Image: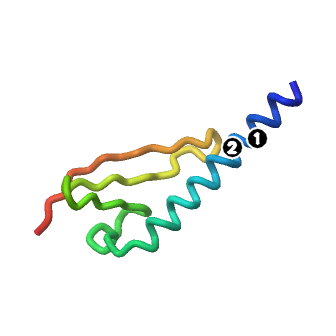
Amino acid sequence: MLFSKLFNFLKIVNYYLIFNLIIKEINSMNVMQNTMQNPANIQLLGNKKIYSAKFCSFKHWKFKILQQNFNKN
């Protein structure tokens, strides 16, 4: 029981650290300038799509990936 709780806690910490790493990596990129309305954007230039990674539920530690169409002017 204690091992299970410890494992779940470490899993949560791992997800949190990965999320922070993703956000730092995204913020260091200059491809966000076209879509500043989203907190985190990755522009895939080849597919002309934007994948927005948002931290949906802080309670449940979930990630939601939103795919949006991107039309380059």
Q: Is mark 1 on a helix, strand or loop?
A: helix
Q: In this view, does 56 lie to the left or right of 2?
A: left
Q: Residue at x 20, y 53 (%)?
A: 47
Q: Position of residue 51 (x, y in %)?
A: 33, 52
Q: As displayed, is residue 16 above or below residue 21?
A: above
Point out the image quarter for the C terminus.
bottom left
Q: Residues within 10 Å of mark 1 (few under 14, many from 20)?
A: few
Residue found 65% across the figure and 42% down from its top: 59
Q: Are marks 1 and 2 in contact (CB under 8 Å)?
A: yes
The quadrant where residue 35 appears? bottom left
**Res. 12 mark:** 2
Q: Is residue 31 left or right of residue 18?
A: left
Q: In which quarter of the image is the N terminus?
A: top right
26 relative to 19, above or below: below
Residue picked out by circle 1: 9
Residue kind at label 2, given as amino acid type: Ile
Q: Is mark 2 on a helix, strand or loop?
A: helix
**Does 13 sit left or right of 61 as displayed?**
right
Label 2: how many Cα within 10 Å (few below 14, some 14–19, many 20+):
some
Residue 50 screen position, x and y as percent: 28, 55
Please, which residue is most extreme toward the top here?
1
Q: What residue type is labelled 1?
A: Phe
Is 29 drawn above or below residue 39 in the view shown?
Answer: below
Residue drawn at the location 52% of the way across and 67% of the way down: 24
Residue 8 shown left or right of residue 31 in the figure? right
- Colour scheme employed for the rendering of this structure: rainbow
